[in-house]
Amino acid sequence: MGLFATVAKLGLAKKAYDELRKPENQRKLKEAVANIKAKRAKG
C-alpha cells in the first residue's frame, strides 16, 4: 500500500508541475498571489 500511495503522489505532483509550466497558468497564479497580497495589505 505504501508504494502505491507514493506512486500516486508522484503522479499528482508531476501533473501539477506540468500545468504550472504553462504560461497561461503562470499568469493566473501570479494574479492570484497579487490579489491575496492586496487583500492582506487592506486588512
Image (tube, rainbow, N blue to C red):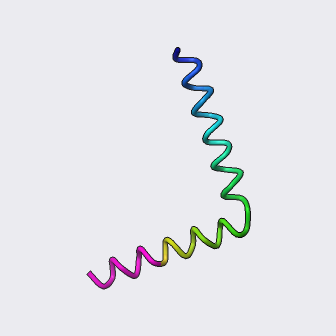
Residue 25: image quadrant is bottom right
Answer left or right for 16 relative to 2: right
Quadrant of image for the C terminus: bottom left
Identify the residue at image location x=66%, y=58%: 20
Identify the residue at image location x=61%, y=42%: 13
Answer left or right for 24 relative to 35: right
Answer left or right for 40 relative to 29: left
Residue 9: image quadrant is top right
Extreme residue toward the top, this view: 1
Location of residue 15 in the rendering, given as x and y in whole percent from the top left corner: 67, 45
Please check the rendered image and state whether residue 36 is part of the magenta-colored stretch, yes or no: yes
Magenta part mainly helix, strand or loop?
A: helix
Please check the rendered image and state whether residue 40 is part of the magenta-colored stretch, yes or no: yes
Location of residue 28 in the rendering, given as x and y in whole percent from the top left corner: 60, 71
Looking at the image, is 24 positioned above or below residue 13? below
Looking at the image, is 25 positioned above or below residue 36? above
Q: Which residues are magenta?
A: 35-43
Looking at the image, is 8 positioned above or below residue 40? above
Extreme residue toward the left, this view: 43
Identify the residue at image location x=35%, y=79%: 39
